[in-house]
Image (cartoon, coloured by chain):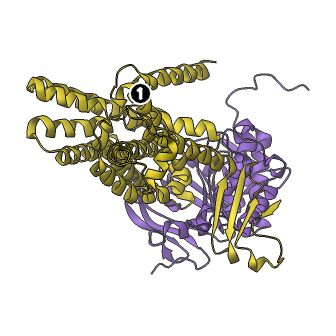
Amino acid sequence: MSEHRPESRLHGDDLTLAYDERVISQDLSVSIPDGSFTVIVGPNACGKSTLLRALSRMLKPTAGTVHLDGELITRYATKEAARRLGLLPQTSIAPDGITVADLVSRGRYPHQKMFRQWSAADSQAVAEAMTDTGIADLKHRRVDELSGGQRQRVWLAMVLAQQTPILLLDEPTTFLDIAHQVEVLELCHDLYSRLGRTLVAVLHDLNHACRYATHLIAMRDGRIVAEGRPGDVVTEQLVQDVFGLACRVVDDPETGTPLVVPAARRRAAVPAQA
Amino acid sequence: MSTDVTPRSDSTPRRQHLRVESLDLSPTSYAARGRHDRWSLRFDRRVVAVCTALTVAIVVVFLTSLAVGDYSIGVLDVVRTLFGNPPDPLAEFIVNGRRLPRALVALLVGAALGASGAVFQSLSRNPLGSPDVIGFTQGASAGAVFVILVVGGSLAQVALGAIVGGLLTATAVYLLAYKRGVQGFRLILVGIAVGAMLISAVRYMLMRAELIEATGAQVWLTGSLNTRGWNHVVAVGIGMAIIMPVLLGLARPMRIIEMGDDAATGLGVNAERTRIGLLLAATGLAAMAVAAAGPIAFIALSAPHLARRLARAPGTTVGSAALMGALLLGVSDLVAQWVLPHQLPVGVVTVSVGGLYLLWLLAREGRRHHV
């Protein structure tokens, strides 16, 4: 019924997204290329998280549809959807005193039943998720004793233990220092390139998006302004249109991807040493 | 590390009926499996230990409450009487006719209050979120007092009034607190406000009533187990038998919802639907407890918290909270009947002990947030 490219397991069509009366997006259509690391960028309040919430069934669209694997996402039993699509929300609450491994094990919930509460597959998935995120050494530590960067990796491990082919991450690098941001993004890169998962993330940092995304979606005022490979879509004009920022786009000296350098409005506060 | 419970005489795993292994998740997490892995249960060793200890304590309190009284009966004779072999007809009458139903009502009502409090505290993510704080108990009281004073109904009608009052209040609080789903703190604030209005409604009804009727209603409002008989046991027992399995089935998704609605959705839990189911079940338990024994205060507030501190396991455990509630009310009723110079309604004891507990809790939380 939809004319989308067949290689998209997750797509939204003609979506109207609103909180109560406040309409965020209208007639929004998007499809997530399989096996991609898709990054959604845009200024604050442009509707990027809202779009992610709709794709992950956290927000029910006022109009339009979201399809997962060729079927309306609302048609799946909620546990079945959770076996196909994992989700890292912006904020989650770790139960008091829970250990790292115990929290990661909660990612197995959609695979368990009332009287099938733990299997060998569960043990294996939890161990793998902790190894992939580099937290195996922390497994018996309490989550509330960890640093912000470690905690974010624990939450990622929980979503990985869910073993879903598609992962949606809502601002996974917020609140992290730059080293931890890069660490999380490298992990994401690993996930799609080595493990073949499809990743969708909302990111704030345009340069991170340019460097790591295989598919970029730029949004403003609830609409998609541009999408495609970062090297193809990120131009000085686009940054001006989307963020209202005058800038220069140069080649990233490390990777050759676009690097956005904001235009100087005045001389540097401390002049460079000659 | 793996421990075999069946004898090791035959080494083929097919013959093992039950295997218990420790999971490498936390020092106290274990899994038990049936033959061919047909079923498996995850459990926390410390929670199991706490539940076992509570059960033993409950049995002791239960037997004590059957033995102690103006006519004391030895524990052995009590046990014989329970197994249909009484030493004399008087002992049979006192144990089976008088003390047994009262003790059973105490245990069932205590368990209902403890389980109900655990659910509300989990849903509101707040140790103060118990049915007697967020207005549901007051709703049940208002319903019962309305039947006592305005309708002048029978005991069964009073119970029905309590249940209807509790459910109506729960619906009102839920709808008033609803804003894109119900969040914990809104639920507590709205509940406190609605509870305060219901208390004033109860006061108004008491003020307008005849003195004798008002006194009767006032005694009921204290919460008492006096003159509770087999009809109460049957009513509460049937209610528990229906609601507790539902509640225990919802306990696993409930612990997932504690991580936040978004995380729960991601893990395949329909947060809003589960929450409505939990609210209905927990309100039903609380209203049923009020219907049987009046609004006994503080058990629902303190039992889940105490059980949790003993077990030191992450997340809410409904079972241990129910056992703790049963133990607390059993002990409170013993104290109310025999330790104090005058026999008092059990509600007076739980209010006094619970008040001290609440002060301690507030002082402790206050310290924690100010340091």
Identify the residue at horizontal 34%, vertical 40% (top origin).
Answer: B177
Single out the residue that lies furthest toward the front. Answer: B88
Which is more toward the observer, A267 or A19?
A: A19
The yellow-tinted chain is B
The relative height of residue B181 versus residue B350 in the rendered view (above or below) is: below
The answer to which quarter of the image holds residue A243 is top right
Q: Which residue is mark 1?
A: B338
Residue B229 spot, x, y in % from top left:
29, 46
Please tell me which residue lies in front, A268 or A3. A3
Chain bearing tag 1 is B
Image position of A215 (left or right of B178)? right
Q: Residue B70: percent from the left, percent from the top? A: 37, 31
> Which residue is more in the foreground, B178 or A33?
B178
Q: How many marks?
A: 1
Report the residue at 77% width, 68% height from top.
A195
Q: Colour of chain A?
A: purple
The residue under the point 73% across, 41% down is A142
Q: Residue at x 24, y 29 (%)?
A: B219
- Would you say residue B129 is visible in this rendering? no
Report the amino acid beneath label 1. Trp
Q: Quadrant of the C terminus of chain A?
A: top right
Rendered location of residue A105, percent (x, y)? 68, 56
**Apparent side of residue B289 relative to residue B116 in the rendered image (left or right):** left
**Vertical order, A263 against A20 (above or below):** above
With B13 as the anchor, is B296 left or right in this view? Answer: left
Q: What secondary structure is marked by label 1?
A: helix
| Quarter of the figure with residue B169 | top left
Q: Is residue B51 above or below residue A15?
A: above
Residue B71: percent from left, percent from top: 38, 34
Please determine whether, in this image, residue A227 is positioned above or below residue B96.
Answer: below
Q: Is residue A31 visible?
A: yes
